[in-house]
Image (cartoon, helix red, strand yellow):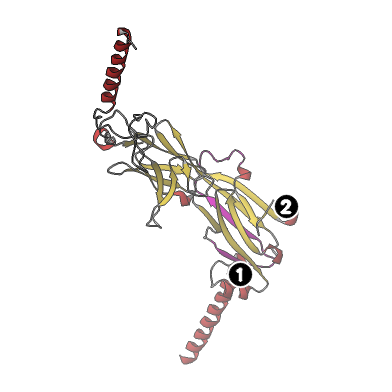
Amino acid sequence: MRIQPFTILIFFTFVIDKNTSKERHHRKLPDFQRTHWYSLTSPTDTIPSPGEYVDYHLAPDPAPAPSFSSTHAPPTLHTDSVGNVTSQLGQSVYLKCTVIGFRQGVNTVSWTKTTSRRDNPIALTFNDKVFVSDSRISVYIDVDTWVLVLLKVSAEDEATYECHVNSDPPKKLAIHLIVQVPIMTVMDGFGRHLSDQYYKAGSSLEVVCELDSVPFFWNSTDISQLLIWKQEQKVVKPRPKDGISILTEYSGSSVFSRLAITQASSIHSGNYSCSVPDFISTPVRIHIVEDENQAFVASGNTNISWKVESGLVNVAKLLIYFLSCSNATFMGRFL
């Protein structure tokens, strides 16, 4: 059979191209980084060993994790309330902590409370979460400022509040809250402080409640409703027909409320209180007794009604009179 020159040319071309292709596939591959990104790109003529998962990625050695401490300055803390913050009883307070340089996902901000009665701080908030069950306490974030909210502060809220940031080193900012509480005093009609008061049945009595100051935000437009008297948790209202009267008035910056009862009886005995509802309250116990000597003994010779006192004074005067008369008679006989 005669072979045509054209056929011989095609055959040699095929052999040369096949050898060249095989040589290209068996050339040593670079030591590329193995990674999961190119799981379907391994060469078709490379067979991995059993159980080995081989991928190839055109990347050098893994890049190191970024170091924030070496490239970023730690956050700084600022507040518009430096040192002490003073609040009136019942007022709402907003403590601000501005964190300059805060990085989301890296830094956290928390508030704590430390009182003079407790060494360990109380955790109040963490970022925007509140840890305590007190509904008066909340926190919100205004751009880069964490605001701790205390509604209707009481005397127990007086403490040192600290804003913490978990930087390296950790940083904190302290604000001391001072709560000004008006002084409420309960007295008898002579101005003596009372906790227990004894009266003889049938006598008249007067108990006075003094509040030394009135915060500006309290509702004091109707002064007759500012101070409230209660007996056994029930509001005492003026009843002139029953001999009960209440007079409330200003005297300088103080407010006085006078509870007067005529012809006191056993129904007027009990636990009383003078209060500004929701803010402050002071208790007093009133005893109505039948025997003035019982009142004298029970009271420890203090805080008894003026009628009992006057009766005792008269008894003392009589004793002194009889003693003086006896001494005079004795001296006359001696002389």
Image mark for residue 239:
2
- Whether residue 199 is in magenta: the answer is yes
In the rendered image, the residue lying farthest to the front is 1
Quadrant of the rendered image containing residue 142? top left
Disc 1 marks which amino acid? Val
Foreground label between 2 and 1: 2
- Whether residue 13 is in magenta: the answer is no
In the image, 324: left or right of 262? Answer: left
- Closer-to-camera residue (32/47): 47
What crowding class fits label 2: few (fewer than 14 Cα within 10 Å), some (14-19), or many (20 or more)?
A: few
Q: Is residue 32 above or below residue 325?
A: above
Residue 292 visible somewhere in the drawing: yes
Magenta residues (range)? 194-222
Specify the quadrant that holds the N terminus: top left
Q: Is residue 231 above or below residue 48?
A: below
| Earlier residue among tags 2 and 1 | 2
